[in-house]
Image (cartoon, rainbow, N blue to C red):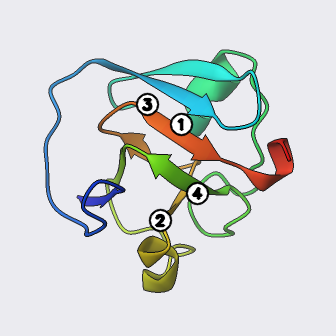
Amino acid sequence: RLIISMRNKSPSLKLSNATQYTVRIKHTEHQFTVGANETLLQAALRQHIELPWGCGSGICGVCMADILEGELEYPSPPLALFEEDEAMGKGLICVGLPCSDLLLYIPEMGS
């Protein structure tokens, strides 16, 4: 699994044993919890929080967000996430699985 971490800014492998994480969206009042093996998008929609997304499978890149705090992992590398994006701390909401609490910046959701 590929993990994007804003602590050391380099991908690593890690398995998490927590069952739930909290996700906050910067410049908004939005906060939601994500369960084990649940993507950020699945959790947000389950809790009636609308996030930008398109394909739902990591191909289009519409759901790209800045990972300001925390770690995000992917079961397999998403096609719309390039090395340059990862180096800038970006991640895909639709296929990303959290491995810590997260603070995200989503330009479409705040100033």
Given contact means CB atoms under 8 Å apart, are the residues at marks 4 and 2 in contact? yes
In this picture, residue 54 sits left or right of residue 26:
right
Q: Quadrant of the N terminus?
A: bottom left
Please give the label number shown on residue 89.
Answer: 2
Instruction: Measure the C-alpha gap from mark 4 to mark 2.
Output: 6 Å
The first of marks 1 and 4 along the sequence is: 1
Question: Does residue 29 lie above or below 24 as drawn?
Answer: above
The first of marks 1 and 2 along the sequence is: 1
Q: Secondary structure at mark 2?
A: loop
Q: Callout 4: few (<14), some (14-19), or many (20+) C-alpha neighbours within 10 Å?
A: many
Q: Quadrant of residue 58?
A: bottom right
Kind of residue at badge 4: Asp
Instruction: Measure the C-alpha gap from mark 1 to mark 2.
Output: 16 Å
The first of marks 3 and 2 along the sequence is: 3
Q: Callout 2: few (<14), some (14-19), or many (20+) C-alpha neighbours within 10 Å?
A: some
Q: Which residue is labeled 4 in the image?
A: 66
Given contact means CB atoms under 8 Å apart, are the residues at marks 3 and 1 in contact? no
Viewer-closest of 64 and 110 = 110
Q: Which residue is labeled 3 in the image?
A: 38
Picture coordinates of residue 39 (x, y %)?
A: 48, 37
Kind of residue at badge 3: Glu
Q: Which residue is labeled 1 in the image?
A: 40
